[in-house]
Each structure stands twice: as C-alpha cells, then as structure tokens.
Image (tube, rainbow, N blue to C red):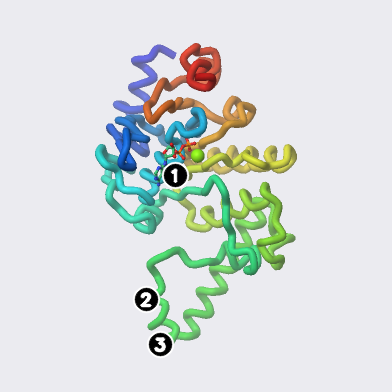
C-alpha cells in the first residue's frame, strides 16, 4: 500500500486510538524517552521493539500514568490523558501488564483477579454498612466475571490455588485476566513472551489474536521475533529513547539501522 494511502487510513481518515506527540522524559541526566511521536491505529496490534535500556518500559509508564512526562502530549480517543493518575487512565479503558508480574502469592488466583481497581474503597466502606445485600450481589458478579476471564486464559482449574504456585507463563496469563476484567479498549503488554514456555507462549499469542479480533487494540513490547512477526503490524523501533523507524515486521527486520541498534 502506498505510504500516503496508509497514512490516510491510520491518521487522517480515522483518528488513531492513541496519539503520542513529542513525549519526553529524563531522570536527571539525558532523556530516556526523547521526543517520541506515534499513532496507534484502532484495532491494531502494534509492536514495540528495541535493545535493552532503549526506553520501552519507561514509554509504557508514561502512557499508563505511572510516570509524568517531562514534555509532550498523549491523546486517547480524542481526549488528553497525559498528567492523569494510573487509576484515571485505567478507568478510561487503557490497561497495562508488567514486565515482571507480581501477583499476591498467598492470595488465590481468583482473589488476585477480583482485587478491586484503585479508587473505590471510600464508596465501598459506606455501601458495606448501608446496603449489605447489594454488596453481596456485586461480589457475586465480580466473582463470576473473574471466573469468566480466568476460563478465557485457561486458568479456571487453578482458581482456588495460591497464586504463588503459578509458573512464569501462568503469571503472565493471570496478569492478562486481571486487566481483562475491566474490558479495556487498549492494552499495553510488556514482554508477554519473556520466560514463557513454548506451549504457553502459543496460548498467549492465540488469546491476544482472539481479543484483537473482538476489537481490542494492543501495544506490545517483545523480544520474541516469532510473536512480533506473527502478530504485530506495524512495528515501532525504539533506540536510545528515540523512534528509529516504523514499518512491517519484514521491513523492520531487514533494515540495517535496526541491526546496528541491536549490535551497537
Ligand atoms: N525510575 C528511573 N530512574 C532512573 N533511571 C531510570 C528509571 N527508569 C528507567 N531508567 C533508565 O532509563 C533507561 C531505559 O530503561 P527502560 O525504559 O526500562 O528500558 P527498556 O524497557 O527498553 O529495556 C535505562 O537506562 C534505565 O536505567
Ligand atoms: Mg523493559
């Protein structure tokens, strides 16, 4: 497809779901994320690759509200989200998973998924006293919804086990179930394939594709080229805090600048 036509589809024709403009962040020294601009097309699975230390996770922290940008803007579905707290960003339908998932090991798998998102404790306190029946009914609904998503990721059988018994791959699936409960429109996945056994990786890839077919947009940090080549279009390449290029997985793989960024 010609570049002009492609641009019309992703930016002018239909505004992107997420638009980042000149995002910048430093930690005292030179910027770790340095003037990064991109558009995530609605319904896409966009890949984000780059060598260790390139700033990928920091970029996720900026998008999810865990870190405030030093400069630049973020727009989700036409509304600015830069400067919002993580729970506010989450409430707008943008969820993220962590590079190293840390479930509460003594709580059951189900309880980990049922943990209330932040910001509701105050309301809950009064409802608990005034309308106990309503609380019980809501708790049942939460439990049913959590079980539904545990079943979706293949962890229903383990729902009563303490989360501490889960393997690395199963923890990635638990993380996915935890964010799916909120039915986000955009999910940021930080290295979903890292430390995951091949059969579980295949399952994770299948679930991403299935959710995407139902309309969920993804931005995925990943080193596993199999996952990137199979699922991601387009792929963004980040090196030393800057966006080096954007292209199809094939274009990216044969670009000499990418090879250099990984080696150099
Ligand atoms: N909170 C922080 N304070 C200071 N330096 C940080 C912080 N977070 C990340 N960095 C630095 O920013 C750079 C990019 O890190 P990161 O975003 O984790 O890279 P990637 O995920 O691409 O491997 C690294 O040099 C890292 O040490
Ligand atoms: Mg990282």
Which residue reaches farthest front? 29
Q: In the image, which is nearer the foreground, mark 3 or mark 2?
A: 2
Left or right placement of residue 12 versus residue 238 in this view: left
Where does label 1 land, which residue?
186
Marks 1 and 2: CB-CB under 8 Å?
no
Other-residue count near label 1 (Cα within 10 Å), few / some / many at <14 / 14–19 / ≥20: many
Q: Alpha carbon of mark 3 to alpha carbon of mark 2: how far?
A: 13 Å
Query: Could you tell me which residue is drawn at 37 percent across and 76 percent down?
Result: 123
Mark 2 C-beta to ligand 1 under 8 Å? no
Where does label 3 land, which residue?
130
- Disc 3 is placed on an element classified as helix
Q: Is residue 169 above or below residue 114?
A: above
Whole-percent x, y for residue 258 in the image: 49, 18
Front-lying residue, 60 or 148: 60
Where does label 2 land, which residue?
122
Residue 227, labelled with which disc? none
Marks 1 and 3: CB-CB under 8 Å?
no
Q: Earlier in the sequence, mark 1 or mark 3?
A: 3
């Amino acid at each position: 497809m010609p570049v002009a036509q492609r641009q019309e589809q992703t930016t002018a024709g239909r505004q992107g779901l997420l638009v980042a403009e000149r995002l910048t962040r430093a930690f005292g020294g030179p910027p770790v994320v340095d003037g990064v601009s991109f558009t995530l097309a609605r319904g896409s699975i966009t890949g984000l690759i780059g060598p260790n230390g390139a700033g990928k996770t920091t970029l996720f922290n900026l998008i999810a509200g865990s870190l405030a940008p030093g400069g630049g803007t973020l727009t989700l579905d036409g509304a600015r989200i830069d400067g919002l707290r993580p729970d506010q960003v989450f409430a707008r339908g943008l969820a993220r998973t962590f590079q190293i998932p840390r479930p509460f090991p003594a709580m059951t798998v189900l309880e980990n998924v049922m943990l209330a998102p932040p910001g509701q404790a105050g309301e809950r306190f009064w409802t608990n006293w005034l309308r106990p029946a309503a609380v019980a009914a809501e708790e049942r609904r939460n439990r049913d919804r959590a079980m539904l998503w545990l079943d979706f990721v293949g962890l229903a059988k383990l729902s009563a086990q303490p989360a501490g018994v889960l393997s690395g791959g199963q923890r990635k699936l638990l993380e996915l179930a935890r964010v799916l409960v909120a039915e986000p429109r955009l999910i940021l996945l930080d290295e979903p394939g890292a430390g995951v056994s091949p059969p579980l990786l295949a399952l994770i890839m299948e679930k991403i594709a299935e959710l995407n077919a139902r309309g969920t947009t993804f931005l995925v940090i990943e080193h596993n080229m199999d996952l990137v080549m199979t699922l991601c279009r387009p792929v963004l390449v980040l090196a030393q805090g800057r966006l080096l290029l954007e292209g199809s997985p094939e274009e990216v793989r044969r670009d000499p600048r990418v090879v250099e960024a990984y080696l150099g």
